[in-house]
Image (cartoon, rainbow, N blue to C red):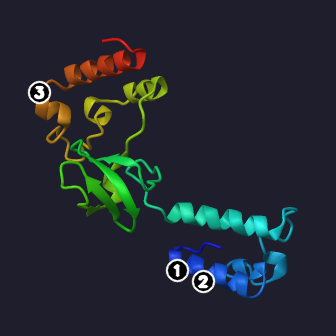
């Protein structure tokens, strides 16, 4: 079971303990006795509870983007400067294959500065419209209090016009019209 700070090594140790003796050993870190085991009063078989907990812990250990979305191998991710990458491995830093580099080239990036590129939809467009300002709409952090570095500000100068133009562009694409 997960303690304050989980790791892949700790998860492997817990699973190996359960395989070596019995499944109850998996929960040893949080349950020193059978009565304190999370599986004790649960009607589901211990195997199912252990597998569910292993899956939960594995998902938590995977890299997550700036919005907390789990990044999987093969996902397209985007930086704040709108550069797109394909996740080719999942490590502490994300192994990506950047656009524009030679085929087979790779780089490591911190996952928490990227966003998973999701297919556009009417629901996503509606969600994005509710962002409070232009920089948030274009996923640009305004921690410094300025629009410096925002793709809309840099390319067009008028952020609100850029936002409105992009909303119309996306709506037309979703509707299948030009």
In the figure, is residue 115 to the left or right of 145? right
- Marks 1 & 2, CB-CB < 8 Å contact: yes
**Residue 173 vertical position relative to residue 26 in the rendered view, above or below:** above
Foreground: disc 3 or disc 1: 1
Residue at numbered disc 2: 13
Q: Quadrant of residue 148?
A: top left
Q: Position of residue 174 (x, y in %)?
A: 41, 20
In the image, 48 versus 143, the foreground residue is 48
Q: Which quadrant is home to the C terminus? A: top left
Residue at numbered disc 1: 9
**Residue 113 vertical position relative to residue 15 in the rendered view, above or below:** above
In the image, 95 versus 103, the foreground residue is 103
Q: Position of residue 63 (x, y in %)?
A: 43, 60
Residue at numbered disc 3: 157
Q: Position of residue 33 (x, y in %)?
A: 80, 83
**Residue 157 vertical position relative to residue 37 in the rendered view, above or below:** above
Query: Element type at marker 3?
Result: loop
Callout 2: few (<14), some (14-19), or many (20+) C-alpha neighbours within 10 Å? few
Callout 1: few (<14), some (14-19), or many (20+) C-alpha neighbours within 10 Å? few
Q: CA distance from mark 1 to mark 2?
A: 6 Å
Q: Position of residue 38 (x, y in %)?
A: 77, 70
| Residue appearing at x 72%, y 88% in the figure | 20
Identity of the residue furthest to the bottom in this view: 20
Q: CA distance from mark 3 to mark 2?
A: 55 Å
Q: Quadrant of residue 16?
A: bottom right
Query: Element type at marker 1?
Result: helix
In the figure, is residue 1 to the left or right of 67? right
Query: Element type at marker 2?
Result: helix
Q: CA distance from mark 3 to mark 1?
A: 50 Å
In the image, 68 versus 90, the foreground residue is 90
Q: Nearer the N terminus, badge 3 or badge 1? A: 1
């Amino acid at each position: 079971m997960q303690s304050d700070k989980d790791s892949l090594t700790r998860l492997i140790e817990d699973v190996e303990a359960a395989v070596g003796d019995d499944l109850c050993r998996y929960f040893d870190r949080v349950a020193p006795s059978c009565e304190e085991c999370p599986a004790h009063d649960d009607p589901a078989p211990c195997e199912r509870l252990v597998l569910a907990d292993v899956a939960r812990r594995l998902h938590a250990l995977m890299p997550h983007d700036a919005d907390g979305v789990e990044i999987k191998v093969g996902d397209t991710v985007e930086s704040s400067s709108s550069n797109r990458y394909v996740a080719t491995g999942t490590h502490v830093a994300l192994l990506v294959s950047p656009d524009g580099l030679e085929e087979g080239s790779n780089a490591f990036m911190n996952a928490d500065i990227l966003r998973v590129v999701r297919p556009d939809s009417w629901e996503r467009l509606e969600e994005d419209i509710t962002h409070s300002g232009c920089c948030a709409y274009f996923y640009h952090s305004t921690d410094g209090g300025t629009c410096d570095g925002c793709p809309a500000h840099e390319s067009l100068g008028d952020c609100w016009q850029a936002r409105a133009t992009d909303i119309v562009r996306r709506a037309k694409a979703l509707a299948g019209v030009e």
